[in-house]
Image (cartoon, rainbow, N blue to C red):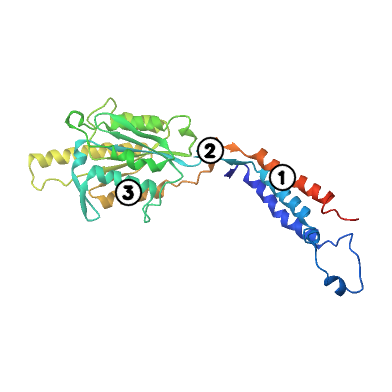
Amino acid sequence: MHFEQPWVLMLLAGVPLLIWWRLRRPSEAALRFYAAEPAASLDRSYRVRLRRLPFWLRVAAVSLLIIALARPQTGGVRTREPGRGIAAVMVLDRSGSMKQGIAYAGQHITRLHLAKQVFQQFVNGNGDALKGRGSDSIGIVAFARTPETVCPLTFSHESFAKLLDGVYPAERAEDRTAIGDAITLAGARLNTPAAREFKSRVIILLTDGQNNAGTRNVWEAARLVSRWGIRVHVIGIVGAAPATNSFFYRMNVQQRFASERDLGQLASMCGGIYRSVQDGDAINSVYAEIDRLEKSEVVRTRFRGGTDQFGAVVLCALTLLAMAMVLSSTWLRRIP
């Protein structure tokens, strides 16, 4: 059960004052004796013992009427109202290179597996540096040759684990990296009328590649998203360069330079940060940094679609009042 207007329940604080005032007031029908010892030895009948029952029934009725004014409701769906929290979309690279191994917490796992694991910690918290984003609306976009929405913006973070399990590295036919299109799709998700009600809208991009597919390049996507007022934070995974000064070494350096230049430009144009990392601990640290930068206020929780119990509670209160009136006029009648 929940209350549509819970502030009304503060009136219940006046009920104990009413009881105290009524019980301390001497009865108008009291008889005065010089000595009470003879009367004290008499047995007390049920009528005497229950003489205050009508009063307590009236107290209960008043309390129920106050509860009814608070509009109690049963059932319904718990929702969180947007407007003061943060809306964030995680843009996750799933190209074939994300199958490469990376070190994290003494383990050697794939980059994609690590990205999914750390992202869940970012959303739900890990009891350490990441406190969780329980009051934020979070969405997921995954991309290789083409981007796709894995999860639209939602407060139901419990579903992320299953949704992320369905994100796999791209097969050979789709093994490209469309960063520009992915950022554009994530920006569109954050540019809806509902998303614009949030105080802040953020894209977090995690990739290990260079834009080599799609209809939009990184600069075009950056200009579009910055015009929408969306901030972009970028985490770029860079592998270790070959140890020898060979053709492949020079090609690797050139590709890395171009990729970092584009990603850094993207973050700079959209008011975010760019961090290049080589292991999982560094990724975790960057998420902690983003968590500190993107402060979020608690969003009010409300229930919608419940059954109003106002009438039932009022009926109970009126029943108690009727019982008090009947008892006061019959079996528990007092004279005068």
| Distance between mark 3 and mark 1 Cα atoms | 58 Å
Say few, some or many: other residues with alpha carbon within 10 Å of mark 3 (under 14 / 14 to 19 / 20 or more): many
Instruction: Say whether disc 3 or disc 1 marks the residue closer to the N-terminus.
Output: 3
Say few, some or many: other residues with alpha carbon within 10 Å of mark 1 (under 14 / 14 to 19 / 20 or more): many
Res 253 quadrant in image: top left
Res 177 quadrant in image: top left
The quarter of the rendered structure image containing the N terminus is top right
Disc 3: which residue: 286
Identity of the residue furthest to the top in this view? 215
Disc 2: which residue: 76
Residue at 23% across, 35% down: 210
Question: Who is closer to the viewer here, 81 or 264?
Answer: 81
Image height check: is 188 above or below 246? Answer: above
Residue 259: give x, y in percent of width and height: 23, 38
Instruction: Say whether disc 2 or disc 1 marks the residue closer to the N-terminus.
Output: 2
Question: Who is closer to the viewer here, 266 or 286?
Answer: 286
Disc 1: which residue: 317
Residue 202: give x, y in percent of width and height: 40, 39
